[in-house]
Image (cartoon, rainbow, N blue to C red):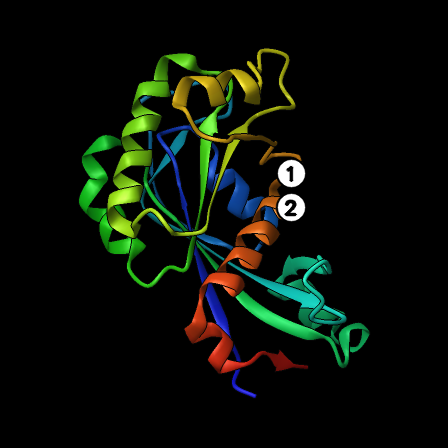
Amino acid sequence: MAEIKIRIFVTGFFNAGKTTMIHALDDKAISVEKKLAEEYEPGKTHTTTGFDLGRLVWARPNLNSETEGVIMSKTEYLRDINEYSGWYTMNIELKGSPGQTQFKTVRKILAKGCDGVIMLIDGCDLANIGNALVILEETKINFGLNIPLRIIANKSDRDDFFGGEMISDMIGEIVYEGSAKDNIGIKDAIIEVLKSIIVNSESLKSKGEAIV
């Protein structure tokens, strides 16, 4: 069967944690960044101005709709490939976008060809919820309302995290809690988006899935 590649667009306003998420999932991920004139917050010295790109593999022992399987980096999969002999696999490409409002055109270009969306919101910065809403509405325009989408209130590991419920009420959408840094809730979100892509995409069904 033909090898399948699914592209997931990772978006959100500046400092939401998009680059952190992608590099936590794939240690070989690449980023086009620029050094900030001054540190935005502890550890935040660079910002994405081009894109982030990470490569993952979703491996499942069967195609049961309840089977979550394993999400891993491409490197991990190739290292342990014998463990997944006979499993169904999908190659996943994460395309991270710059978050500043002036990069609207860049986000629109990066969004082309993507099959689903993960959106991160800084769960410790309510002052930027308005900017997050702008990114969300922009995403809906770029993809349409039926695109598989998961919204994550990021930084749940921090003491100043406001909680997914509060942010959900503020933006009027279902929001899940997670931590990109500690990889909490992130792989689950990716799997849910992938499941939605499979259900919604007739073109994907027609391709079949690769068995490695």
Q: Quadrant of the C terminus?
A: bottom right
Q: Residue at x 30, y 42 (%)?
A: 139
Location of residue 195 by image quarter: bottom right
x and y percentages locating residue 65 in the rendered image: 67, 62
As displayed, is residue 17 above or below residue 187? above
Q: Residue at x 44, y 72 (%)?
A: 202
Residue situated in front as seen by the camera: 16 or 142: 142
- Disc 1 residue crowd, few under 14, some 14–19, many 20+, Cα 10 Å: some
Rendered-image quadrant of the N terminus: bottom right
Indicate the amino acid at tag 1: Gly
**Does 207 sit left or right of 76 as displayed?**
left
Q: Residues within 10 Å of mark 2 (few under 14, many from 20)?
A: some
Q: Residue at x 32, y 27 (%)?
A: 133
Which residue is label 2 attached to? 188
In the rendered image, which residue does mark 1 sit on?
Answer: 185
Whole-number angstrom distance, CA of label 2 to CA of label 1? 5 Å
